[in-house]
Amino acid sequence: MSTNNHSVVTAYKDAPVRTVKAGGVTYAYRELGPKGGIPVVFFVHLAATLDNWDPRIIDPIARNRHVITFDNRGVGASSGSVPDSIEAMADDAYTFIKALDFDQVDIFSFSLGGMIAQDLVVKHPELVRKLVLTGTGPRGGKDIDKVVATTYYDILRATLTRKDPKEFLFFNRNATGKPAARAFVQRLQERTTDRDADMSLKGFRTQLKAIKKYGLSAPADLSTFTQPILIANGDNDRMVPSVLSEDLHRRIKGSQLVIYPDSGHGGIFQFHAEFAPVAVDFLGR
């Protein structure tokens, strides 16, 4: 066996947990893939921790890229309390990235993570080389403030049927959506050791408040974005309406848009076999 590649972890389920201290916060993160070059930093969704990334998306990217996932302040194993605004979450993400000594990163974001990533690019355009925005929408986007009601409704439906709320929130409840949902939830269990702490209820509610505020605030000027940007979603996103992906695409010149049929908020997870190569190609170009 060759020794040079021997220590490179390329499966997310085996990625070691590390910590870095910055600005009075201890950030928990995982890293995998070959080091060197520009890393791909993953920005996760509402109520999510390090354990919420689909290995079928991360692993193909980590084959050739240094990949980093992290818990933002107050989430999972990171210390501190969850900020009540998306801008503050973006400031924390910036603090975390700079604490790891990176001058430039690519960002892969999903849902709330995409909102944070946009605010980060608005403030620090030089930090981000390429951006993947999935299942997300722009600041002030139509009906983003309704995420709160949809989320609580689906958590109730899931509780009554003893299912994971993501099965309702991320997937259509039809013949294609239901098995895709179950498969996704199972993939999130592939890591068996050293799993992350769950999101606290208080932190979850604070994130929801921040999303509502973001939805009701004045739009950011996305015409200043010059990075290559890939936008993806399902065609029936109940959490962050699919039209907002089209809105982002219209407002960001030169962006690339992929919409998957008969799928919801978790369209990229349902269509992971199709989407992962698209993401790898986009990030590799």
Image: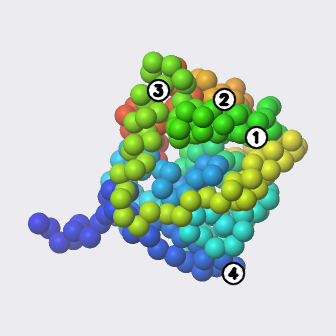
Question: Which residue is denoted by mark 4 in the rendering?
Answer: 24
Q: Are marks 4 and 2 in contact (CB under 8 Å)?
A: no
Q: Residue at x 37, y 34 (%)?
A: 273
Foreground mark, 2 or 3, reads 3
Residue 3 as seen in the image, left or right of residue 114: left
* Residue at screen point 45% across, 42% down: 185
- Label 4 – label 2 distance at C-alpha: 37 Å
Q: Is residue 278 above or below residue 79?
A: above
- Which amino acid, mark 2? Arg
Picture quadrant where residue 220 is located: top right
How far apart are the alpha carbons under marks 4 and 1? 30 Å
> Residue 237: percent from the left, percent from the top?
63, 29
Residue receiving disc 2: 238
Q: Name which residue type carries label 3.
A: Lys
User: What amino acid does circle 1 point to?
Assistant: Val
Query: How many numbered circles does the render carry?
Result: 4
- Which residue is label 3 attached to? 178
Circle 4 sits in a helix, a strand or a loop, which is it?
Answer: loop
Residue at the spot of label 1:
148
- Identify the image quadrant of the N terminus: bottom left
Cα separation between marks 3 and 1: 23 Å
Work out whether residue 162 can be spotted. yes
Give, as a three-letter code, the residue at label 4.
Gly
Res. 281 in view: no
In the rendered structure, which disc, 1 or 2, sits on the residue that comes first in sequence?
1
